[in-house]
Image (spheres, rainbow, N blue to C red):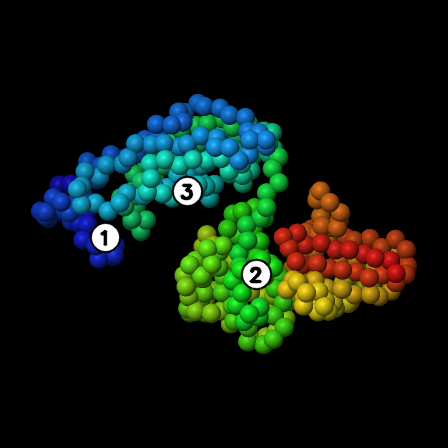
Amino acid sequence: MKNTVILFAFILGVSLLNSCEKDDPEYVLDMDEAVGPQFTNPVTGGSWELSEEEETNVLFAFEWSPADYQLAAAPDVRYLLQADLTANNWENPETIRDVVETRANVHEITVGGMNRLLTQMGIEPFDTGEVSFRLRAFLTGASEYTWLYSTPINLSITTYEQLVDPDILFVPGSWQGWDIDNTNTVLYSPDRDDLFEGYLYFSEPDTELKFATEEGWAENWGDDDGDGTLDPDGANILVADPGVYRVNVNLNALTYAVRKTEWALIGDAADGWDTDVFLEVDEEYFAETWKTRYKITRQMVPGFFKFRANANWDLNMGIDEDADEEGVLMYGGFGNDIPIETAGEYTIIFDLSGPLYTYEIIRE
């Protein structure tokens, strides 16, 4: 007897039900008869060399034949276009990238969009990546029963070096007047992978906030249960104590974390590797920009120092020696201590404005 699914589940908005009963054929789904989508363009084996000069041009359009569930009353079919390195053979869910979800049978991708996708997948600039694409058709994402996969296509694509602006996530709240369009009070995703981070200064107690995309209040998240899980259009998130907070948001898992931080200098160039010299927020800078940085003027001696939070080494920063510009910081690591070569009075600026964390040393 064939498995069937009664589509009253879609009408009621609940999970799909398995059934072997005879029902109105208009509402009975037989997956043995369903036909998956198939790519019609591009064809497997195609190759492209991407160019920065053509970054905004359309590279090509993914086109595919529609899935057919052999059901007159089926809901609209949705498609998820996915990518993976061909060598992975779709065996590791963690390496599979979701490109777009759509109800259409076509998706255009620009040269720049393809280059960003391949860069996120770990393909170095000017290397040729062997990339596989596939389609998942489905009637509901909640049940794998209706999922149909296309035959993958394999493409060879050569990348270029691309400077990409990070994605941003707005953080409107009582701390900044609930200004949904304030581009200074945001978190950043440098890799554009929906993992966001930033350091925000809440100068008053009982701060309330939410997270929102560029769509404004049409796409925002709060936390109804106060459990670190984001809810669409959820309740305001409360931060009781004033201070500088490291805020992380994972829009893939719809989770967030808010951690209070108190930053300090530590090292033999300051007061030794066992003594924290705590920093104070640059209030004037915050008043002008809504952004977080620290500023201190003090005597330093020849040696090295780092920045660390909460008198603990689990959160510290030193020089990012691989950065393209000077003064860029990175978390943790060894051998990235910041040098002071000559004794004297210095002004040290520790800037957490993002998306890159930086420092500046000024000899007075």
In this figure, which residue is indicated by the disc labeled 2? 182
In the image, taking residue 308 as reference, residue 155 lies left or right, namely: left
Residue 203 position in % (x across, y down): 63, 73
Nearer to us in this view, 362 or 272: 362
Binning the other alpha carbons within 10 Å of mark 1 as few (below 14), some (14 to 19) or many (20 upward) gives: some
- Image quadrant holding the C terminus, namely bottom right
Q: Is residue 362 above or below residue 34?
A: below
**How far apart are the alpha carbons under marks 3 and 2?**
28 Å
Task: Compare marks 2 and 1 and give the one earlier in the sequence.
Answer: 1
In this figure, which residue is indicated by the disc labeled 3? 100
What's the residue at 18%, 41% (across, down)? 71
In the image, taking residue 306 as reference, residue 162 lies left or right, namely: left
Nearer to us in this view, 188 or 225: 188
Binning the other alpha carbons within 10 Å of mark 2 as few (below 14), some (14 to 19) or many (20 upward) gives: some
Residue 222 appears in view: yes
In the image, taking residue 303 as reference, residue 105 lies left or right, namely: left
Task: Compare marks 3 and 1 and give the one earlier in the sequence.
Answer: 1
Q: Is residue 91 above or below residue 198?
A: above
Amino acid type at circle 3 is: Val
Helix, strand or loop under label 3: strand
Residue 161 position in % (x across, y down): 62, 35
Residue 76 position in % (x across, y down): 26, 45
Residue closest to the far right: 343
Query: Pointer 2 and pointer 1: residues touching (CB < 8 Å)?
Result: no
- Image quadrant holding the N terminus, namely top left
What's the residue at 15%, 47% (across, down)? 27
Residue 131 appears in view: no
Specify the quadrant of the image occupied by residue 122.
Answer: top right
Q: What mark, if any, has residue 10 been given in the picture?
A: 1
Helix, strand or loop under label 2: loop
Q: What mark, if any, has residue 106 been given in the picture?
A: none
**How far apart are the alpha carbons under marks 3 and 1?**
23 Å
